[in-house]
Image (cartoon, coloured by chain):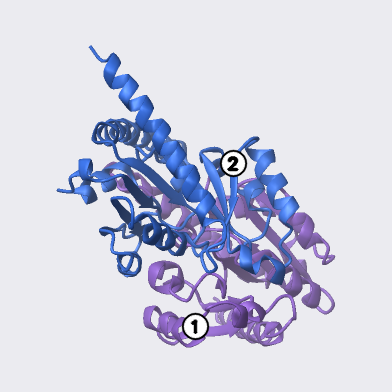
Chain colours: A purple, B blue
Amino acid sequence: MQSSPRILEVRQKVLKQNDLLARSLRERFRAAGVFVVSLVSSPGAGKTTLLREILRRLHKTHRVAALVGDLATENDARKLAESGAPVRQIVTGTVCHLEAQMVETALGDWNLAELDYLFLENVGNLVCPASYDLGEDLRLVLLSTTEGEDKPLKYPTIFNTSDAAVVTKSDLAPLTEFDRAACLANIQSVRPGLKVFEVSSRTGAGVGELLEMLAARRALARSQGLAEASHAP
Amino acid sequence: MQSSPRILEVRQKVLKQNDLLARSLRERFRAAGVFVVSLVSSPGAGKTTLLREILRRLHKTHRVAALVGDLATENDARKLAESGAPVRQIVTGTVCHLEAQMVETALGDWNLAELDYLFLENVGNLVCPASYDLGEDLRLVLLSTTEGEDKPLKYPTIFNTSDAAVVTKSDLAPLTEFDRAACLANIQSVRPGLKVFEVSSRTGAGVGELLEMLAARRALARSQGLAEASHAP
């Protein structure tokens, strides 16, 4: 994001283009019956480690896949593929966020109808990804206990545009000056009512509750999708 | 940063404009004899806490000041002002990085000739700040032990454009899976020869070495500045 009036104008056009493509992606996901979850956070907040744990658990009972974005390296895709789920890396070069076009291109020949869940791990960045709809059903914003409890106040847009928050590295909280009450209050002050999960991908604590929420939201999305289909002309 | 050709073209113009303004800022800083250090990192890597410790120590013997950038809140300026040094907050709104223009505006009526050191704390973001010269003498990139040692490989540009790296939260390293050797090797692989400092702002470990480097670099810059002045027509 840039500050000059000219670039803001061009940016509006790019965003509008992205929104249109995201909408068509969302329709495609819905038609295929795949529930799509994106993850956003600072670099190092634990997106990949949490996603690896999620894929490892879900892969036993569901058909899952993931796309993972980074400026450089395919390290995350390799890490995630250890779960046994199909994973593709999106290398963005100098681009600081994923866009709907990158998701569409990376999906390639995947048959979405053969998937129950698709996860989209964004580039580590608490600012720019907030503005780009990827067609996901649910956006998770992660915040690690080692980052400090003030982040929701300093990066309000990404919390405002997310559907649930995940406080990661909960096992490290007692070892740092992390103020849990202040963190939860800060999240609620920028996004009242936002559901918050507290997890440790290392110990596994809290990951089960997060998966239950995803399953419930997926069931809801499917029932709505079926209702819409039955009302179609 | 965006991916469309049109926005890339406009972005080039903005960057060029920024570079020109940064160059004039750099000349102004040099003429005033103030040594300018910028700090970049992920959100929550510890820029503010390290800077507070730096200001607290330097304030006793030198004339120091700081500008601190955030999308929202003036929390960091308040925290830093506890050091006794003059501090101004730059609130960027939705802009994910500082630009030379913001620095110039925030400096306002400050008499730079009355300063020995000026610190510029960028917005927490490992991507976009890399492209914007702020006229600083030295750019420090921070990486916390809790973020993981792979970050230099995944965000190479910000390490490539920095003059020294600071590994923060070294007191937490033994409590996490932080692989120190891999971290140092990764930094060297993207930027061979980059000087690395390991600090804990909580215990104060390593901060003295960092300050010694800044003092040495400041002395060098001043001697070059004097040499240039004596050769001026």
Residue at 68% x, 71% y is A34
**For mark 2, what is the residue?**
B195
Give the SS element for disc 1: loop
Residue B111, position as x, y percentages in the image: 18, 45
Residues under numbered marks 2 and 1 in contact, where contact means CB atoms less than 8 Å apart: no
Residue B190 appearing in the image: yes
**For mark 1, what is the residue?**
A179
**Does A217 appear above or below A35?**
below
Residue at 67% x, 40% y is B188
Q: Quadrant of residue B164?
A: top right
Spatial CA distance of label 2 from label 1 is 33 Å
Give the SS element for disc 2: loop
Task: Please state which of the two labelled residues, at mark 2 or mark 1, is closer to the viewer.
Answer: 2
Residue A98 appearing in the image: no
On whether disc 2 and disc 1 are found on a single subunit, the reply is: no
Please tell me how crowded label 2 is: few (under 14), some (14-19), or many (20+) other residues with Cα within 10 Å. some
Circle 1: residue type: Asp
**Does A18 appear above or below A35?**
above
Q: Nearer the viewer, residue A78 or B31?
A: B31
**Does A49 appear above or below A128?**
below
Q: Quadrant of the C terminus of chain B?
A: top left
Q: Is residue B191 left or right of residue A147?
A: right
Circle 2: residue type: Lys
